[in-house]
Image (cartoon, rainbow, N blue to C red):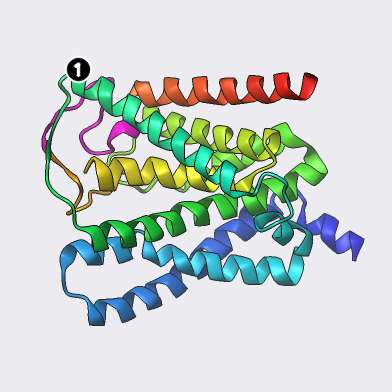
Amino acid sequence: MENKKKFRHFLLVPPVMSFILMILGTLIGMIIYTVCRQAVSDSAWLFLFESYGVFTGIWIITIIYLAIFEKDILKNVFNGLNGNNFKMLMIGNAIGFGMNMICALVAMLHKDIALSFSGFDIPYLLVAAVLVFIQSSAEELICRGYMHMALRERYGVIIAAIINSSFFMAMHLGNDGVTWISLAEIFIIGICATVMVECYDSLWMAFALHASWNYTQNIILGLPNSGLVSEKAIMHLDAAGSSIFYDKVFGLEGGITSVIVCVIVSIVLYLLAKKKNEV
């Protein structure tokens, strides 16, 4: 059994297995989406199910895989980490919101984007919050919950962090408008999420960071989220132009501000955790 476990944690196995889980999970998610499509005709709601809801399948297939082959790792998804609690969930949520708002403010001050109030659709906003969390946490479950945990056992934290963040970056290569800046940002936010897992013993904190970033950008501000544009949001994007601070196709993640913010937050989180552990 130990030899089988070591093989499952060999350098290329977790990334390959993660890719397989994503493919199978997406297929399951598309079946779920097809069912939802029969009951929903509104294009804005269909966007939610197609862009975010399909990731339910990744959750399902990954949990099944972990329950069969990686029970120790599965514990980390729920109560196996001390930082998996409501407090860390809220802190991660606040950090993701703050990071995104800083990037948006810079883009607005540089006149790359102009926003106006669109309105509140409470049912839509609540369902969007659930589905965005499912999508974001599914990606974290694959990259930080499974892949990182499996690799760090054999190769250490640094190698595991680089591989899981590179895989996370590769997941977005097919998105509309992807650029070298956006890829750098995605890699670094993967590192930031890994810092949360390692330094704060919290996968939930990484779940919340990712979900809050996506929700703020796409559903609150109405901006492209890695190339995906929601038809309904609290704010309406009246005008957009590309610059070093904002990409009109990829969104805030295509600007240098997001890279800088992610680097700063990663460093600050690491230093705060290090200082706390030294006291």
Task: Name the residue nearer the viewer: 12 or 117.
Answer: 117
Q: Residue at x 74, y 54 (%)?
A: 80
SS label for mark 1? loop
In the visual, does 99 lie left or right of 206?
left
Q: Is residue 253 placed above or below 14 in the rendered structure?
A: above
The residue tagged 1 is 110
Q: Is residue 111 placed above or below 137 in the rendered structure?
A: above
Q: Is residue 224 visible?
A: no
Quarter of the image for the N terminus: give it. Answer: bottom right
Rendered location of residue 10, percent (x, y)? 77, 51
Rendered location of residue 251, percent (x, y)? 27, 36
Q: Which residues are magenta?
A: 238-253
Give the residue at the far left of this rendering.
238
In the visual, does 45 lie left or right of 140?
left
**Residue 50 highlighted magenta (yes or no):** no
Which of the 4 image quarters holds residue 239? top left
Q: Residue at x 57, y 70 (%)?
A: 61
Q: Residue at x 91, y 60 (%)?
A: 2
Q: Residue at x 52, y 37 (%)?
A: 91
Rendered location of residue 100, percent (x, y)? 36, 32
Crowding at mark 1 (Cα within 10 Å: few <14, some 14-19, many 20+): few
**Principal secondary structure, stretch drawn in magenta:** loop
Quarter of the image for the C terminus: give it. Answer: top right
